Image: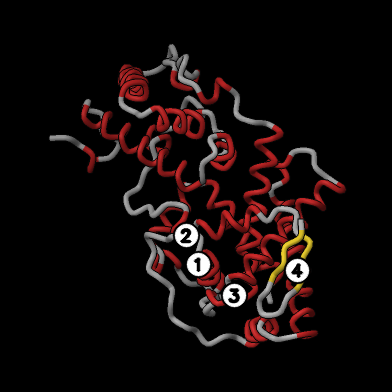
Amino acid sequence: MTDERPFDELLHAREGDVGCDAGRPILDTYVEIELSGGDPSRQFPGTSIHLTVCAGCRADHDGLLEAAQLFGE
Amino acid sequence: MTVLVTRPTPVLLSLTHASTYHAVMASRRVVGEPPQRREHLLDAASRRWVDGLRADGQPYHQTVGALHAMLLRVAFHELGRRRTMLGVVSGPELDDLAHQSADDALVNILARLDDFRGASRFATWAYKFAMFEVSGKVARHAWRRNPPSTEELSWERLPDSLAPKPGDAAERREQLDLLTSAIADDLTERQREVFLAIALNEVSIDVLACQLRSSRNAIYKNLFDARRKLRHCLAAAGHPLTPAEEVE
């Protein structure tokens, strides 16, 4: 953490965050909505919030999005 | 080790880390997002995958082989994407990680084929399993190579990041003092440990989960609760972080 990091970021905890496990079963659907130009936060608001905070789930999401774009089928 | 996959027809797969399979199967309870139970019309490619995996004999084995090759490509790609967490890994060790990930993903996919309802393309659904396997294996590798230090986990001294600096305004100094006191006095031991490691010392959540023999979800819950409690402490002391947190 840098000394200038705002407290709001350090203490980031948004209401509606569903946590890690809720996003796992729907992550593929979430990614495909993104790939089709849609907004997954409308269907999965809790996961959308969660992905802005959880670095682990964000890495899984980013990897899946990239794989779906690159490897297709 | 060798695992016998018995559905729809027996096929022997050489698997090295079947424990992941059991961990995934044991963590199927889902809360928070609406259930995705509706059947969708499958696209042609997804239909071919599903039909192949439900076939018998040669068509089944060919489909399993093609799926494994696809999962292996995804695993290698994802390992490359996460190379900063892996450190210096190449050659046989990298191959082993990729193959373990693809093997375990394949076992999970075959076991859960009935769960696939076409809400996404089959390939994206399948890649997801490879992604989770790579994610878990990279975290365990990183933890074995470079576990969190005692300093990153313990609250024996004030982290440098929370020490007031000569140029800090009085309000920031007060906030830092409040935050430091709340971390020491208001968090549970586990919340303090998790907050210190992840929020202040930037330890990876998955590496910390390995260290504490826990899960990402459980660690995240600790972190979320710790952050919320600290926000409340600041707000109660007259330092709300948002207007909505102002205490009358």
Give the residue pinned by disc 3. Answer: B113
Q: Nearer the viewer, mark 1 or mark 3?
A: 3
Q: Secondary structure at mark 2?
A: helix
**Type of residue at label 3?**
Leu
**Mark 4, chain letter?**
B
Q: Is residue A27 left or right of residue B96?
A: left
CA gap between label 4 and label 3 equals 15 Å
**Type of residue at label 4?**
His
Q: Is residue B41 above or below residue B77?
A: below
Q: Earlier in the sequence, mark 4 or mark 3?
A: 4
**Image quadrant where one finds the N terminus of chain B:** bottom right
- Asked whether the residues under marks 1 and 3 belong to the same chain, the reply is no
**Image quadrant where one finds the C terminus of chain B:** top left
Residue B206 is situated, as x and y percent measured from the top left of the image, at 57, 42
- Residue B233 placement: quadrant: top left
Q: Residue at x 67, y 48 (%)?
A: B137
Mark 2 is surrounded, within 10 Å at the Cα level, by few (under 14), some (14 to 19) or many (20 or more) other residues, namely many
Give the residue pinned by disc 4. Answer: B68
**Type of residue at label 2?**
Gly
- Asked whether the residues under marks 1 and 2 belong to the same chain, the reply is yes
**Mark 1, chain letter?**
A
**Type of residue at label 1?**
Tyr
Q: Residue furthest left?
A: B248
